[in-house]
Image (cartoon, grey):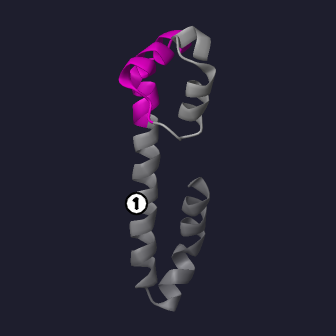
């Protein structure tokens, strides 16, 4: 991939490992090489973050419920946590 987008292998490794930020030009080249739209890379990450935020909100609300209500919703909460 590094060769195909025109950067050093070590530079690409640093991007993959999160040690350096991906530059827009490199992202555009990666998208072209993989034949994917930019939204493929952006929306997925935002969606995961959004789900995690919503599960956190639900857990806060869950803590406020009485024992009977917690029992009713515990299976749902556990399944949502497994998604994240």
Which of the two residues, 29 or 57, is positioned nearer the viewer here? 29
User: Which quadrant: the C terminus?
Assistant: bottom right
Q: Quadrant of residue 3?
A: top right
Which of the two residues, 76 or 36, is positioned nearer the viewer here? 36
- Is residue 1 inside the magenta stretch? no
Is 79 rendered above or below residue 37? below
Label 1: which secondary element = helix
Q: Residue at x 40, y 32 (%)?
A: 42
Q: Residue at x 53, y 16 (%)?
A: 7
Q: Which residue is tagged 1?
A: 54
| Count of numbered badges drawn on the protein | 1
Taking the image as shown, residue 57 lies to the left or right of residue 33, namely left
- Spot occupied by residue 53 in the image (x, y as percentages of width and height): 40, 59
- Is residue 30 inside the magenta stretch? yes
- Spot occupied by residue 16 in the image (x, y as percentages of width and height): 58, 33
Is 20 rendered above or below residue 61? above
Is 77 rendered above or below residue 38? below
Which of the two residues, 17 or 65, is positioned nearer the viewer here? 17
Q: Is residue 1 visible?
A: no
Is 83 rendered above or below residue 21? below
Q: Residues within 10 Å of mark 1 (few under 14, many from 20)?
A: few
Q: Residue furthest bottom?
A: 67
Boundaries of the magenta span:
21-43
Query: Which secondary structure type mostly characterizes the magenta part of the structure?
Result: helix
Which of the two residues, 66 or 52, is positioned nearer the viewer here? 52
Q: Residue at x 37, y 23 (%)?
A: 24
Q: Is residue 29 visible?
A: yes
- Spot occupied by residue 44 in the image (x, y as percentages of width and height): 46, 36
Q: Quadrant of residue 58?
A: bottom left
Q: Quadrant of residue 62?
A: bottom left
User: Which quadrant: the N terminus?
Assistant: top right
Q: Residue at x 45, y 26 (%)?
A: 40
């Amino acid at each position: 991939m590094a060769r195909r987008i025109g950067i050093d292998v070590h530079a690409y490794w640093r991007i993959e490992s999160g040690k350096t930020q991906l530059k827009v030009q490199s992202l555009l080249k990666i998208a072209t090489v993989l034949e994917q739209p930019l939204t493929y890379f952006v929306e997925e990450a935002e969606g995961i973050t959004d789900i995690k935020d919503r599960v956190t909100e639900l857990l806060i609300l869950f803590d406020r419920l009485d024992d009977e209500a917690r029992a009713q919703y515990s299976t749902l909460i556990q399944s949502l946590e497994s998604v994240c």
